[in-house]
Image (cartoon, rainbow, N blue to C red):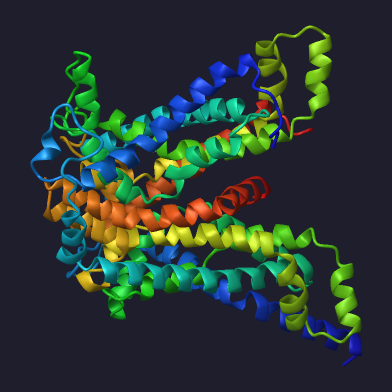
């Protein structure tokens, strides 16, 4: 064997040694389980019984299951409320902070605080804030003569209430991303625009927003994927109620698998979720012409 | 920062907005602390008082003793530390190979790795549960430790990007001195990756410390519960005892908030690093 090939063999051996733990994990904990999940999504497999092949029945059942459509609708509605509010709110905060202000670092740290706290503990605190009779929010409202709703117990308010809390928790993280994006906009563009007499509103629309569009794109994609997978908050605050008003896809998967032990059906729903996330992400990339990458 | 700058009048509306915003961010925490120090009676005071009268420290004692909160702390700490250390090691190793080494099937393997980042965790949840219940890992900490150590595609990707940007000359010098690939990874590459490792470490730790769904599925024995799971049990058991519930939340949140207070620079820089290079 020539020294060259021996050397190459040795290099390969080292490289495989380096990637071995992650590749093992990839096979054992991702690729294997995904294939397995795909297999059992075609079976009726209730825990404690033997699996029965039932073809597409788990999938076709969903198409006629009102609960499935309800959780899809709720998840979509959650995303539709959560994403724009978070994007606009965190961009607004970033714009306010993106200047030489005294105490800027303190504000930045304060806005970021909810990000580091656990969703479970925060959900508990907000459940108390939302308490219809003694919660801070309704007490404050009634002091100005407004009778607040039963935030988490009212069919129409429950989902928006959860959205408000999740936006509160997500603002800081995305504000930091936007701040980094804003820092990357070259200042000579603003100076040139000022000389041309552009108002600050025009500078925002014509310079800032196009220049930070890669950040906005990234933020929207990440928020979208996160919204599709929301679980802890509705689990903690409402268990999906009242009357499925806050039941979302992952909570539905959890209940199907670990309350009703229908593993095959839960796997089928998780694959539908996978496909939905994949399709939405691909569509986003397809229609990302508005994103300006030539900075 | 502009410490010597004057206060221009035009910044006043900005400050007003910023202060209102800061109030909204902080108020839930203040309300949590306030309620945690109230007695069952004064909890329903109207209008609600921010400073409780009398201050009831007893809630903290009750929260600490009714459920194994101390154990939950240790469990959460153990899991989060092991996962963080382990996944930093394995993902930096793989990141190094993908950034700096030539090997067979490197591109396809990297593409597969990236593709797995698209798969939502819920898809693998059910088969993993069925598999782990076969090997009697349910109600142990293994399902919460081993999979996140060995499958961290995002970490591999982040560190690969970071390492690829480190000039090869650094390593070449080491190779002349006769370092083998492991030594060159350990002695030259890792010390140069500290910012990326710190960022990834913080997020891995936070993610596992706050993780809720997997512990909820796998753990049954209260003595093995993690902190989020204990908090969730409080809600199930003491639905209306809000001072107790808020004391428990407070116990779980305050240490994190203190760490954050001192290390907030790293938290925030970490996002910029992982968010924009990722």
Q: Residue at x 17, y 26 (%)?
A: B47
Q: Quadrant of residue B215?
A: bottom left
Q: Residue at x 25, y 28 (%)?
A: A137
Q: How many marks?
A: 0
Name the residue furthest bottom.
A1
Q: Nearer the viewer, residue B10 or A201?
A: B10
B88 shown above or below A65: below
In the picture provided, is A3 more to the left or to the right than A233? right
The reply to whether residue B201 is visible in this rendering is yes
Residue B40 spot, x, y in % from top left: 10, 45
Q: Quadrant of residue B194?
A: bottom right
The quarter in which the N terminus of chain A is drawn is bottom right
Q: Quadrant of residue A80?
A: top left
The quarter in which the C terminus of chain A is drawn is top right
Q: Residue at x 15, y 35 (%)?
A: A243
In the picture provided, is A279 more to the left or to the right than A61? right
Q: Residue at x 17, y 69 (%)?
A: A49
A96 shown above or below A22: above
B187 shown above or below B255: below
The reply to whether residue A42 is visible in this rendering is no
Residue B108 spot, x, y in % from top left: 68, 63
Name the residue furthest top.
A197
Residue B260 spot, x, y in % from top left: 49, 53
B79 shown above or below B238: below
In the picture provided, is B249 more to the left or to the right than B21? left
Residue B275 spot, x, y in % from top left: 61, 47
In the picture provided, is A267 more to the left or to the right than A189? left
């Amino acid at each position: 064997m020539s020294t060259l090939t021996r050397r190459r063999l040795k290099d390969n051996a080292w490289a495989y040694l380096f990637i071995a733990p992650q590749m093992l994990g990839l096979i054992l904990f991702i690729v294997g389980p995904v294939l397995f999940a795909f297999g059992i999504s075609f079976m009726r497999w209730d825990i404690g019984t033997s699996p029965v092949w039932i073809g597409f029945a788990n999938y076709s059942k969903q198409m006629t299951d009102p609960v499935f459509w309800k959780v899809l609708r709720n998840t979509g509605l959650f995303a539709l409320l959560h994403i724009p509010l978070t994007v606009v709110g965190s961009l607004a905060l970033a714009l306010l902070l993106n200047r030489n202000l005294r105490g800027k670092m303190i504000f930045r740290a304060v806005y970021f605080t909810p990000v580091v706290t656990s969703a479970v503990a925060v959900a508990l605190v907000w459940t108390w804030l939302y308490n219809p009779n003694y919660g801070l929010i309704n007490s404050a409202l009634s002091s100005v003569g407004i009778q607040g709703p039963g935030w988490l117990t009212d069919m129409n308010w429950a989902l928006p209430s959860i959205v408000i809390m999740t936006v509160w928790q997500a603002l800081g993280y995305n504000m930091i991303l936007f701040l980094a994006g804003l820092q990357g906009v070259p200042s000579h563009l603003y100076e040139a625009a000022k000389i041309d007499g552009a108002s600050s509103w025009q500078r925002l629309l014509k310079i800032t927003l196009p220049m930070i569009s890669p950040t906005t794109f990234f933020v929207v994609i990440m928020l979208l994927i996160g919204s599709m997978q929301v679980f802890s908050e509705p689990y903690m605050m409402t268990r999906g109620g009242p009357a499925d008003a806050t039941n979302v896809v992952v909570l539905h998967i959890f209940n199907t698998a670990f309350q009703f032990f229908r593993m095959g059906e839960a796997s089928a729903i998780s694959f539908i979720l996978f496909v939905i996330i994949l399709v939405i992400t691909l569509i986003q990339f397809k229609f990302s012409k508005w994103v300006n990458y030539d900075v | 920062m502009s410490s010597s700058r004057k206060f221009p009048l035009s910044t006043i509306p900005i400050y007003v907005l910023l202060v209102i915003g800061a109030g909204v961010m902080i108020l839930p925490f203040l309300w949590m602390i306030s309620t945690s120090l109230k007695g069952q009676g004064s909890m329903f005071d109207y209008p609600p008082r921010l400073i409780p009268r009398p201050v009831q420290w007893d809630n903290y004692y009750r929260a600490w003793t009714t459920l194994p909160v101390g154990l939950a702390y240790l469990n959460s700490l153990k899991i989060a530390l092991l996962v963080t250390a382990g996944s930093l090691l394995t993902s930096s190793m793989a990141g190094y190979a993908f950034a700096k080494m030539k090997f067979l099937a490197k591109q396809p393997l990297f593409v597969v790795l990236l593709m797995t980042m698209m798969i939502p965790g819920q898809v693998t949840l059910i088969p993993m549960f069925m598999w782990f219940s076969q090997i009697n890992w349910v109600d142990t900490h293994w399902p919460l430790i081993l999979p996140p150590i060995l499958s961290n595609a995002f970490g591999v990707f982040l560190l690969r990007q970071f390492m690829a940007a480190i000039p090869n000359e650094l390593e070449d010098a080491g190779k002349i001195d006769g370092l083998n690939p492991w030594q060159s990874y350990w002695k030259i590459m890792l010390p140069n990756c500290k910012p990326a490792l710190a960022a990834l470490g913080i997020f891995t730790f936070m993610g596992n410390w706050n993780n809720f769904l997997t512990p909820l599925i796998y753990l049954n024995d209260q003595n093995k519960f993690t902190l989020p799971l204990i908090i969730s049990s409080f809600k199930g058991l003491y639905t209306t005892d809000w001072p107790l519930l808020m004391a428990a939340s407070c116990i779980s949140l305050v240490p994190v908030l203190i760490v954050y207070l001192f290390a907030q620079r790293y938290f925030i820089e970490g996002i910029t690093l992982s968010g924009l290079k990722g």
